[in-house]
Image (spheres, rainbow, N blue to C red):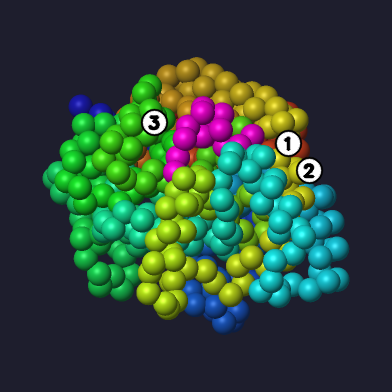
């Protein structure tokens, strides 16, 4: 009985602690150059790193990267790692795809930013519609910005205030989405830095897959937009239940809300993203991260009908700044990279290789979990694979939050890193790129097997 209360997801807590201590010592010994480079705050960066989340890896200090190419990353200490994080989707098609690198070199000779359209920009619009469907596009520097602008459009054309999001959702750093469902009420998420606005006045949170709750929120007449990922990511992945997306489409039309689909993480699903693969029909589509091969870029598109509604609204609004757009967005480098990615990198052949490799990875991880009799499961969405330290499938964000076990997950992550495989730090996600090799996948499975064998022994 005593042993039972000291288990985490089937593993004795004492065993997790011992494993973490050993792997932490091994990491420190193997990475003296990274440690020395980060020590003392000599770099001048707040907290020692240029973005605070770079300290969120499970290692005692972050790796300092030296270079990356294809599906490998080399750190400052010379370790060559099989990269399954791939910039947390930003480099899903591999680091520096040759067509993108060539486009960058070529454009760099002709200027980096002009605030004017180019021939490549016009071609990028055509390629976007060919890949994702018939939308009227705009470009941004990040999916966070694209989601912000999409919400402005939705509020403008509907005259409503609130956005409906799903508990546990991820849409970048959009304030409106930083809410949670607690005791049946929408509340701001804890930990938000310097938060002063009442987020619950602008957003309503309900559980993913809960159509009754969606309809109840829409029936108030306050909802301008539903903002959702096709699959909940950035936590423990939650798949949509049968009929869920069809119901969102039906209800959004019935109650006059704009349906926004954020495909930033689910481009892993196949060519054109989850929505194109599964014939979804959003009013606004948002795509970021890897859409330009790793160059900072995102796009958001309106259906022709919504574009016409927005044009009418735009023509009638008072003169003044729209609150949308940034100076460096729509720069020619973005369009050069968008064209190269959409025409030469994001291809049916690339996705076929990614699907095959991801299937191999998912089956291998599942076999290990089954062999050690762990109460875990594996989820795959195209090239995106995740092991979850709980039985499944999960149905919503609350279940996903309860399925997280940070110390145990940190132990597995660090064990994989020490054995040469890098996976995403904030969750248990792995991506298979078109250039990931079977031997890399098999090395990860072998390392995962060794780690779970020890933890569940």
Report the Cα–Cα distance between label 2 and label 1: 6 Å
- Along the line of sight, which residue is nearer the eye, 16 or 386? 386
- Along the line of sight, which residue is nearer the eye, 446 or 200? 200
The secondary element bearing badge 2 is classed as helix
Q: Is residue 55 left or right of residue 66?
A: left
Disc 1: which residue: 347
Q: Is residue 362 above or below residue 64?
A: above
Which residue is painted at 47% across and 32% down in the image? Answer: 280
Mark 3 nearby-residue class (10 Å; few <14, some 14–19, many ≥20): many
Residue stretch rendered in magenta on the structure: 271-287
Which residue is painted at 25% across and 72% down in the image? Answer: 196
Asked whether the viewer can see residue 105, the reply is yes
Check whether the beta carbons of the residues at disc 3 and disc 2 lie within 8 A of each other.
no
Q: Earlier in the sequence, mark 1 or mark 3?
A: 3
Which residue is painted at 47% across and 18% down in the image? Answer: 370
Quarter of the image where the C terminus is located: top left
The secondary element bearing badge 3 is classed as helix
Residue 344 image label: 2
Mark 1 nearby-residue class (10 Å; few <14, some 14–19, many ≥20): some
């Amino acid at each position: 009985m005593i042993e039972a209360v000291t288990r985490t997801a089937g593993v004795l807590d004492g065993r997790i602690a011992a494993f973490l201590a050993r792997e932490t010592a091994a990491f420190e010994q193997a990475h003296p150059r990274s440690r020395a480079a980060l020590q003392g705050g000599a770099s001048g960066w707040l907290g020692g790193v240029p973005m605070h989340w770079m300290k969120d890896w499970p290692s005692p200090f972050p790796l300092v990267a030296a270079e990356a190419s294809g599906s490998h990353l080399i750190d400052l200490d010379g370790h060559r790692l099989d990269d399954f994080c791939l910039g947390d989707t930003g480099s899903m098609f591999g680091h520096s795809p040759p067509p993108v690198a060539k486009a960058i070199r070529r454009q760099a000779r002709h200027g980096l930013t002009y605030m004017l359209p180019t021939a490549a920009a016009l071609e990028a619009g055509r390629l976007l519609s060919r890949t994702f469907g018939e939308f009227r596009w705009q470009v941004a520097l990040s999916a966070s910005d694209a989601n912000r602008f999409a919400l402005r459009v939705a509020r403008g054309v509907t005259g409503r205030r609130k956005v409906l999001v799903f508990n546990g959702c991820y849409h970048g750093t959009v304030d409106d989405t930083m809410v949670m469902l607690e005791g049946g009420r929408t509340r701001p998420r804890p930990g938000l830095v310097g938060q002063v606005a009442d987020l619950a006045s602008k957003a309503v949170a309900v559980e993913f897959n809960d159509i009754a709750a969606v309809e109840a929120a829409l029936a108030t007449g306050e909802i301008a937009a539903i903002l959702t990922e096709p699959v909940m990511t950035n936590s423990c992945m939650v798949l949509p239940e049968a009929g869920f997306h069809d119901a969102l489409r039906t209800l959004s039309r019935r109650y006059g809300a704009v349906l926004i689909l954020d495909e930033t993480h689910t481009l892993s699903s196949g060519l054109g993203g989850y929505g194109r693969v599964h014939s979804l029909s959003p009013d606004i589509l948002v795509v970021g991260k890897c859409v330009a091969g790793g160059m900072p870029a995102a796009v958001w598109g309106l259906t022709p009908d919504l574009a016409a509604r927005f044009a009418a609204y735009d023509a009638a609004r008072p003169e003044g700044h729209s609150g949308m757009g940034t100076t460096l967005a729509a720069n020619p480098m973005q369009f050069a990279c968008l064209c190269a990615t959409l025409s030469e990198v994001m291809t049916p052949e690339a996705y076929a290789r990614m699907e095959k490799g991801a299937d191999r990875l998912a089956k291998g991880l599942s076999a290990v979990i089954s062999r050690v009799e762990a109460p875990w499961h594996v989820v795959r969405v195209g090239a995106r694979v995740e092991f979850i330290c709980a039985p499944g499938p999960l149905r919503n964000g609350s279940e996903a939050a309860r399925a997280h076990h940070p110390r145990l997950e940190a132990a597995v992550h660090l064990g994989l890193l020490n054995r040469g495989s890098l996976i995403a730090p904030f969750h248990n996600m792995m991506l298979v790129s078109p250039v990931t090799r079977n031997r890399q996948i098999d090395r990860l499975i072998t390392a995962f097997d060794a780690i779970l064998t020890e933890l569940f022994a």
